[in-house]
Image: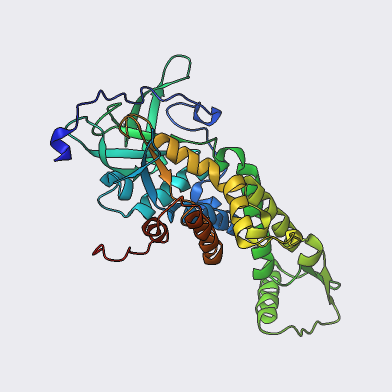
Amino acid sequence: MGLFTRKPQILEAQVAPQVMSDSYLTYGNYFPVLVTRQQALQVPAIKRCRDLICGTIASIPLEYYKKSTGEMLPAPRWVTQPSKAQPLFETLYFTLDSLLMHGVAYWLITETYLEDNRMANAEWVANNRVTFNTNSTNNYVTEYYLDGKPLPMSGLGSLITFQKDEGILAVGGSTIKAALDAQHAASVALATPTPVSYLKNNGADLPPAEVQGLISAWKRARQNSSVAYLTSTLSFESVGFSPKDMGYSDAIQNLATECARLCSVDPYYVSASQNTTMTYANVQDERKQMVAFTLQPYISAIESRLSMNDVSTDGHYVKFCLDDTFLRTEPMERLLVLEKMLSLGLITTEQAMQMEDLTPNGNGE
């Protein structure tokens, strides 16, 4: 019934998204980066930060509200499941992944409502599939391309653009590469436990073939036993530093801290040993701090974009249900608040039961 009685509205699409970051300013795509997304995720600290940010936010449901009254309304289908092929969690998870890595994420509109041409369904699109043209001053995007094919700028087949910042690949490439190099150096040291060394011949020179054979035999023997025998004309000389002297472990821990800072995550969450001192805080306070200093920019980027008039109808907005999920207080604290509100007559018993997701007595639900 609502479908046929709704008044037609003029759709105001997001015309020519503004370029907000220098990481855009290259021919048709992003600046070249030192590391790729796949390489960045090989750093455990980056992987941990990605899982923490994306997994936490994607697990929080979206809700639909009326601006004038703050009333929560039945949500359109794109709020609960934007893509027909994926649950909401997967779509949000990779949208947040794109915002973290690249600073921008894309949804491709796959279905629209007939009455106003607004989005009915959309699916996440990988950043490496999208290129674009800008105006003469590189301030606004004038046309998007998906896999090299031009897309309309509004309606069916167009892109919804989420923007946050430059992305960690653009601004933190050197830090991520250093972390990869430290891991590689430690891996090489572990794979070749024998220190850098050479065999010195104090007698007559040997032919090259015999030298190579001697070195190969020495290497094979050391893989099986740490005990060796040398003739009077041969001596073993070690050069270089041990892995401990090279400080691989300290370097990895320090770079884990830097990667956490790069992602605006408290180093405590990536188990960086040099950051184990934390003041006492209960779970609720810790989660509030995480939202304020780490998660909020991502939450706001998605909420504000989906609340724009080319997606949500005029007078409505989208919001993550943070208070009733991630920031939900302990049951005893909630009961004390409800008791106070009931005693003041601010709510009824039925409303209190509804606030606790309890079925009111006798309503048959």
Q: Is 157 left or right of 315, judged from the image as shown?
A: left
Measured as percent of width and height from the top left, residue 314 is found at 32, 29
Q: Residue at x 46, y 46 (%)?
A: 96
Q: Residue at x 60, y 58 (%)?
A: 284
Res 161 quadrant in image: top left
Position of the C terminus, as image quadrant, is bottom left
Q: Nearer the viewer, residue 95 or 41?
A: 95
Q: Residue at x 28, y 38 (%)?
A: 109
Q: Is 40 left or right of 278, judged from the image as shown?
A: left
Residue 358 drawn above or below residue 108: below
Residue 190 drawn above or below residue 316: below
Q: Is 363 left or right of 296, judged from the image as shown?
A: left
Marks counted in the figure total 0
Q: Nearer the viewer, residue 35 or 43?
A: 43
Res 305 quadrant in image: top left
Res 123 quadrant in image: top left
